[in-house]
Every structure is written in structure tokens, then in C-alpha cells.
Image: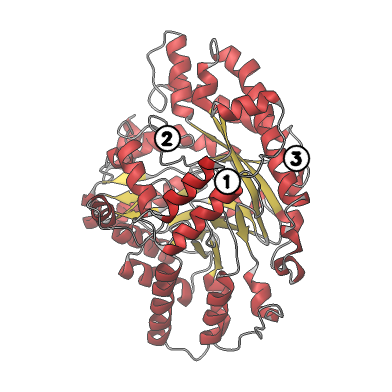
Amino acid sequence: MSDLLRRIEAIVTDPALEPARKAHALAVAAENALPYPALDGDTRAALDARVICDMFEGHAPYRPRYVLPDYAVLMRQGSAHLELPPPQTLDEAISTLMIAYHHVPSVTGMPVYIGRLDALLLPFCEGVSDDALHRRLRLFWRYLDRTLPDAFMHANIGPADNRVARAILRVDAELKQVAPNLTFLYDPEVSGEAILRRCTDSIIACSKPHIASHPLHRAAFDARGYGIVSCYNALPLAGGASTLVRLNLAAVARLSRGADDFLAVQLPRHVALTARLIRARVDHLRNRSGFFASFLVAEDWIAPDRFAAMFGVFAMAEAVNHLQDLAGRPGRYGHDSAATALGQRISAELARLVAAEPVDGAWRGRALLHAQAGLSTDAGLTPGVRIPYGTEPDPVAHVRALAPHHAHYPSGISDILTLDETVRANPEAVFQLARGVLAAGFREFTANVAGNDLVRVTGYMIRLSDIARHAAGGGARSTTTPLGAEASALTGILDRRPRVIAHELAAGERR
């Protein structure tokens, strides 16, 4: 109790925390004073050693990690609980969404999914001029960043080319806010080149949006659909993720005698332990928390059977490089063909092992494999299956090394291609690179452009000017600025090597 009281006092008296953040931190401290869901000794030991990690979601899960309401239901029928009639005009539609967002929980305390906004708002745009639409969306965008200042909040647009999607891309590039995050769902059969060019031009301006392969994601889910949330996580619409538990592949490699022992003994053992932790957390949420008695279920915004369990992995690069060292081989992951092939083999085996572990209460009865983006404290460990920062090869070699992994990670996998600022004079190169990356089998294309104030950390956004202000003691308006500052100091995110892509296709052919 004395430790808890000291923690509470530290939160209450922390001058860097605003009242709302203090309230959230106090809630986390209270939850973590409760007993953890029951675990067997081996799972508990692996968790304590951080070979497996619960992402610090809390000791007593009482709300899902991520919630993806089907906001189209709200638009059709309104909400009895919130005393909202179905909206009839664009202003009413935006107001309805603004109200709804404050009733959607997540592990961050703020919504991580605010809908496929063009599909939600387009029916209300008849008779609204382009200028009026732009002004309303600009106010809406500013409202989101100022009242829900968390870069894990995520909007989707696409795959159709439409005036709302174009207006959102314009507003996002103008305001250059960290929130909301944004993904365009690209379908080469539907979207067309014009809207893809708008997306890549916006990336040059503000490093947003992500561009996701809609055909690949759509095939992984069902007819009700999916959403991209938080960093780049793909999850069932009208559901979400009950929990995200991750496995440190580098730690597993350090417990192994070599690649054969890693694949045949240590990886299966630790996949099983991770699955046990997932089951314990899902069970507590579904059977003890009472969350699914919410009006969100009663009004069909969400359905209990549409919540996935996310099985995350990270530090693939460090795992492969350690196994290479054990074998006396100098080749490095992402550069050497044998090392890169070993990483691809590990992803395929992970997919097989995870699919063999049943999870009661999870969507389709199994966890979804996820290339996890890391934590701000992951010093010396590379997110997901990415190539370590500062060692990235040319873009074509980079894509060829990582594309085979993407088939195995249905709940999200991402890389961040950092491009030299000379691309501002050659936007066609970014367009061609995005189209080529998606055609090569990537689930999404994401890029930073050197020289932009707005940059991606692992999937969420920060502004370098905010980081500098925070470091100088100026505080932080966004909840994710301190995370980005910590990641900048500890994980080398600013060491990503900008690549020139003007002649990437020719360079790729010569390799």
C-alpha cells in the first residue's frame, strides 16, 4: 500500500502532467494495484523476464485495447443511449461523430478509430459546395487534434476517389497535425491513379497518409469489413482487439543454441506461453469485466464475437543477426540473402504456430499475428520485422527483403521508408514507389520525407518542433509527444537513413 500511495502522490504532484493525464495515470495505478489474471509459473516467469510482454495494458483488463465501432449504424439509426437522432445534414453528421467519439474506450483513454470518414460523410454532402466542405472539415480536423490530442487516433478513407476523401487529404496536408493518423485504403481496381497521386503528394507535404492494400486486408476479414487503427493495425469492424501481447524474438534467440533449436524448440515453447497470456487476458475481459454489457453492444456499434486477440512479435532483425552470429555467419538481416531468408522462414513458422493455438473468445477462435511497432523504451530492438534504423538498403532491395513477410501478418505489418527531401522536386518517384511497393505484396506503404516537421515514429506521428519544445521544458499538448521524445532518445528513430529514389527502378534492375 505504501508503494501505491507513493506512486499516486508522484502522479498528483507531477508538474508535467495536465489534469486529464493525471486522471488517466491514476486510473492505471489503481488497476495495477489489483491482482494479475492467474498465470502458470512458466508464463509468469516469461512475462517477468519480458520475453513476452503485455504492453503494460494493466493488471485487470476492463476495456478492450482497441474498439472499432461501426459508425455507419449510428448514422442510420442514431443512438437512444446518447439521445441522438439520425443526422440529416453534414453539420449534424459531424456533430454526431464528435459526440460519439467521447464514448468509445481504448487502452489510451481516447478513441483509436474514428471511422471511414468519406463513406460516413459523403451521403450528407449533396448541395454542400467544395469551399463549404473544406471549411467544415478543417474545423473538424482541428477539433479532433485539440480535444483528442493522441496520435494513435486513426481515420480511414477510400478506396473510392471522392470529394470528401480529397478534401480530407487537402486539410491534413494544410494543418500538418499529429492527430488524427490517416490511412487511404487503396484498391487498384477502384481507386484510380489520380487519388493515389494525391496521397503521395500529401506524403511529401506531411508524411501522411499510410496507403494500405485494400485487396489484401479485405481478403483477411469478412463482409462487414475492417478498419486500420492506432499505428497501422488491421482489425474487424464492429469489433476490435481485446488485447495485444507481444513476443521478443531477440530474447528467444538468446535462449537458443542455434537456428534449429530456435525453430524447433524455443519458438514453439514461447509461442505457447504467449498464447497462455493472451487467453488469461481475454478471459478476464470477457467474463469478469462486464464491458460487453455496454450500450455499444446493445445498439450494434460493436459485437462481442468480433474482437480479435493480437499476437505481436518484434526484434526479428536482432533475432536473425544473433542466430547468424551463433553459426559464425557474418551476413546481416535485410542485406544478406541467407539471413533475410531465415527471417522469412521465421515469419512463416510463426504464422503456423499461432494458427495452431486456440483462443476462446477471440475472433475466429485464434489470435491474429501482428508485426508490433515497439515501445518507446525498446533500446537496441527493431520494431516488427523491420531492418534496423540507419542500415536500410536502397528502396528496391528493402522492399524485396521484406515483402515476403507481409502475407503472414493479417493484423498489421509496416515499414517506414525515409526518403531524401529531393523527392519534393520529383513527386512522380514517390507515386511510382508507392504503386510498386503495393504491387510487390506490401500490406501498406508508409514514408517519411526528410526535412518535414511531421514524422512517423513507429506508426504514430510526432512533430520535431514539439519534441524540441518538450525537451526544453515547454510541456506537451499531445499525449504522444512524450512517447516520441523517449523513442527519439532511446530507439534511434531519427537515425533512419533517407534514400534517394529518383532512379530506384534502374538501381533495382542492376542488383
Residue named by callout 3: 359
Q: Position of residue 157 (x, y in %)?
A: 51, 66
**Badges 2 and 3: C-beta atoms under 8 Å apart?**
no
Q: Position of residue 451 (x, y in %)?
A: 22, 52
What is the three-letter code of the residue carrying label 3?
Answer: Val
Q: Nearer the viewer, residue 134 or 362?
A: 362
Answer yes or no: is residue 180 visible: no
Q: Is residue 2 left or right of residue 83?
A: left
- Residue at coordinates 25% horizontally, 58% vertically from top-left? 474
Q: Quadrant of the C terminus?
A: top left
Q: Nearer the viewer, residue 442 or 148?
A: 148
Secondary structure under the numbered disc 3 in the rendered image: loop
- Residue at coordinates 41% horizontally, 84% vertically from top-left? 130
- Residue at coordinates 72% horizontally, 65% vertically from top-left? 294
Query: What is the spatial separation of the Cα atoms under label 1 and label 2, in whole angstroms?
Result: 16 Å
Answer yes or no: is residue 206 visible: yes
Query: What is the spatial separation of the Cα atoms under label 1 and label 3, in whole angstroms?
Result: 19 Å
Q: Residues within 10 Å of mark 2 (few under 14, many from 20)?
A: some
* Marks 2, 3: nearer the viewer: 2
Mark toward the start of the polypeptide (1 vs 2)? 1
Q: How many marks?
A: 3
Q: Is residue 503 left or right of residue 312?
A: left
Residue named by callout 2: 378
Residue 57 is tagged as 1
Query: With respect to residue 477, does 391 lie above or below?
Result: above
Query: With respect to residue 266, does 225 lie above or below?
Result: below
* Marks 1, 3: nearer the viewer: 1
Secondary structure under the numbered disc 1 in the rendered image: loop
Query: What is the spatial separation of the Cα atoms under label 2 and label 3, in whole angstroms?
Result: 28 Å
